[in-house]
């Protein structure tokens, strides 16, 4: 049996909401392995992909003076609340 392959890497960045004034930032290392397994009877080729978390941080923004949750209200009701 003989194993032959190659490895490719790439950095990935992701932003995710974490609250009214916070953003979660993650940086991943993506590892992609192209593996070929040679045997006397068969040849198999597979691609294996995995992500490794390198860094995770929370970016904190300014705290808003006011916050309105206007879901479920129509436009007339919204204007009455603001005025």
Image (tube, helix red, strand yellow):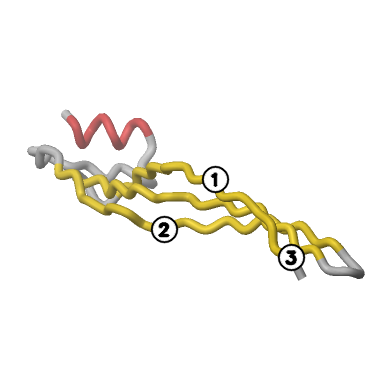
**Which element type, helix, strand or loop, lies under badge 1?**
strand
Task: Determine the residue positioned at 15% across, 44% down.
Answer: 60
Of 33 and 22, which appears nearest the observer?
Answer: 33
Is residue 43 depicted above or below 17 in this figure? below
Q: Position of residue 62 (x, y in %)?
A: 10, 38
Residue at image coords 32%, 49%: 26
User: Residue under circle 3?
Assistant: 2
Query: Which residue bears the numbered disc 1?
Result: 8
Residue furthest right as drawn: 41
| Secondary structure of the residue carrying numbered label 3 | strand
Where the N terminus falls, by quadrant?
A: bottom right
State the residue position of label 2: 52
Q: Quadrant of residue 39?
A: bottom right
Q: CA distance from mark 2 to mark 1?
A: 13 Å
* Residue occupying the point 34% across, 43% down: 15
Left or right, residue 45 beside residue 6: right
Task: Say if mark 1 contacts mark 3, CB within 8 Å.
Answer: no
> Which quarter of the rendered picture does the C terminus lie within?
top left
Give coordinates of residue 29: x percent, y percent: 42, 50
Q: Measured along the vertical axis of the image, is residue 16 above or below residue 4?
A: above
- Residue 42 bears which disc, if any? none
Q: Give the spatial CA distance, label 1 vs label 3.
A: 20 Å
Residue for point 29% across, 35% down: 78
């Amino acid at each position: 049996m003989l194993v032959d392959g190659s490895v490719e890497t790439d950095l990935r960045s992701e932003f995710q909401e974490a609250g009214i004034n916070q953003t979660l930032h993650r940086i991943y290392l993506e590892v992609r392995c192209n593996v070929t397994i040679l045997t006397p009877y068969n040849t198999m080729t597979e691609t294996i992909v995995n992500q490794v978390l390198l860094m995770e941080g929370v970016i904190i923004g300014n705290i808003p003076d006011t916050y309105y949750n206007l879901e479920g209200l129509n436009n007339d009701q919204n204007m009455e609340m603001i005025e």
